[in-house]
Amino acid sequence: MAWLSVAIETDCARAEALADALMEAGALSASIEDAAAGTAEEKPQFGEPGSVTTPGWDRSRVVALLDEDADVAALIDSAAQAVGLAQTPAYKVDSVAEQDWVRLTQAQFEPIRVSERLWIVPSWHAAPDPEAIVLVLDPGMAFGTGSHPTTRLCLEWIEREVKPGDSLLDYGCGSGILAIAAARLGAGEVQGVDIDPQALDAARDNAERNAVTAHFHAASQHVGRTFDIVVANILANPLRALAPALAGFVRPGGKLALSGILAEQAEELIACYAPWIALAVADTREGWVCLSGTRAE
């Protein structure tokens, strides 16, 4: 079976409405891209909770997937009328051949070497080093496959700092990768919290797959204790808001590591946590930093 891919260039104001109208008219899927992608005019879109952003691109491209036998002209004309366009926009049609989509997707994810003894390996790959500590983790809906610089920074910090029997809290656990790594590296009691129920489900499944004991629960549930190590790989705004709570989870003499922080945000976060813990830059990668510090006894 084959499909048709239809690309329509429009502006930011109409892109989302046009994508919705194409779906209503019978498209199988619709997405919005930067029409200037790959050129000097490309504009990356970034944002985080609490930030002010204007989503979309001045030159947007709406890409719709249609059945091979779809009446392309009629479908686009219907969508154009639905969003109030005076005339049917120009469009480009390409054929999309049948492929083994599962194999194609899996081919994009290779094992990741974190350090000399720590690897992240998708379940469909054999471990490159049978002597290494292997974290079996597949890409999914929860953040944390090991490919993002902030995740790598935290994994490397955990490998350096976790001692056998340490208790650890992974705040904003996502896939659970940091908690699972800590358990594989010898941590004792390991807990993870998140606001996303799907992330918690993914973390529990990943812990079971890696045969480790780690407890994951909603962030709204009171943790009710302190830990030897607290790790939070989220974003600067929530880290700022959570400063009293995260610092409070660290026992006297315990350690805190924060990531998801851009280099230019580091000084502000250090100042924010100064009343409780003196933080410093532990490591940097690709414009991101990991901050860490020890709570005074």
Image (cartoon, helix red, strand yellow):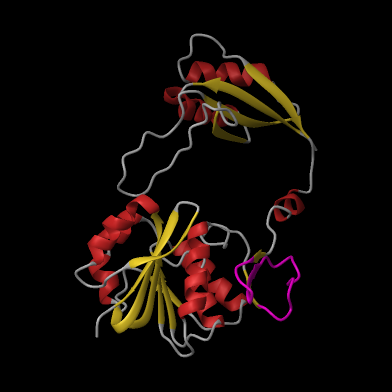
Residue 38 visible at all: yes
Q: Is residue 25 above or below residue 280?
A: above
User: Measured from the top left, where is residue 197 in percent x and y?
Assistant: 44, 64
Give the farthest residue toward the left: 275
Give the farthest residue toward the top: 86
User: Measured from the top left, where is residue 138 in percent x and y?
Assistant: 63, 63
Question: Which is nearer the eye, 248 or 84?
Answer: 248
Residue 176 visible at all: no
User: Measured from the top left, where is residue 137 in percent x and y?
Assistant: 62, 67
Is residue 79 covered in magenta? no
User: Measured from the top left, where is residue 18 in percent x and y?
Assistant: 50, 25
Q: Is residue 281 above or below residue 286?
A: below
Q: Quick check: 132 left or right of 58?
A: right
Dividing the image into 4 quarters, which one contains the N terminus?
top right
Question: Which is nearer the eye, 222 or 162?
Answer: 162
Q: Quick check: 126 left or right of 202?
A: right
Name which residue lies at 73% across and 72% down: 127
Is residue 117 covered in magenta? yes
Q: Quick check: 208 left or right of 98?
A: left
Name which residue lies at 56% across and 35% down: 31
Dividing the image into 4 quarters, which one contains the C terminus?
bottom left
How many numbered marks appear? 0
- The image quadrant of residue 134 is bottom right
- The image quadrant of residue 12 is top left
* Secondary structure, magenta segment, majority class: loop
Name which residue lies at 65% across and 26% down: 6
In magenta, the rendered stretch is 113-132
